[in-house]
Image (cartoon, rainbow, N blue to C red):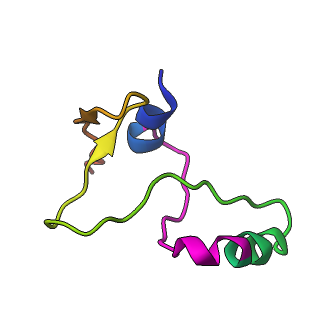
Amino acid sequence: MPAWRMAAAGGEDYELCFCASPEDRAAVEEAVGALGDVQVSWIGEVLAGPPGVTLSDERGEDVRIEGFEHLW
């Protein structure tokens, strides 16, 4: 399974998503590194344009996936 599909639709593995400007990358990595055994996964970039989110595969092509919906 490609890493992008596991990250977007896999279950039971959780990460906090946040945005940081490219010029703050070193400061973010230093702050997170100070917490111990924690890493930052840089997964994309925010671009100007119409509202919405797209996910691209390793070739840069848009993909559509669906996550798991928990029902009680």
The residue nearer to you, when weighing 27 against 16, is 27
Quadrant for residue 51, please give it.
Answer: bottom left
Seen in the image, is 41 located left or right of residue 26? left
Above-or-below relation of 21 to 67:
below
Seen in the image, is 63 located left or right of residue 40? left
**Residue 20 percent location from the top left of the image:** 52, 74
**Residue at (18%, 66%) from the top-left corner?**
49
**Residue at (72%, 58%) from the top-left corner?**
39
Quadrant for residue 22, please give it.
Answer: bottom right
Seen in the image, is 71 located left or right of residue 59? left
**Residue 34 percent location from the top left of the image:** 85, 75
The residue nearer to you, when weighing 65 against 54, is 54
Task: Provide the major secondary structure of the magenta segment.
Answer: loop
Which residue range is magenta in the image?
A: 10-26
**Residue at (76%, 61%) from the top-left corner?**
38
**Residue 71 percent location from the top left of the image:** 25, 48
The residue nearer to you, when weighing 37 against 25, is 25
Asked if the magenta segment contains residue 57, the reply would be no
Seen in the image, is 65 located left or right of residue 14? left
Above-or-below relation of 37 to 8:
below
**Residue 28 percent location from the top left of the image:** 68, 75
Looking at the image, how many numbered discs can be counted on the residues? 0
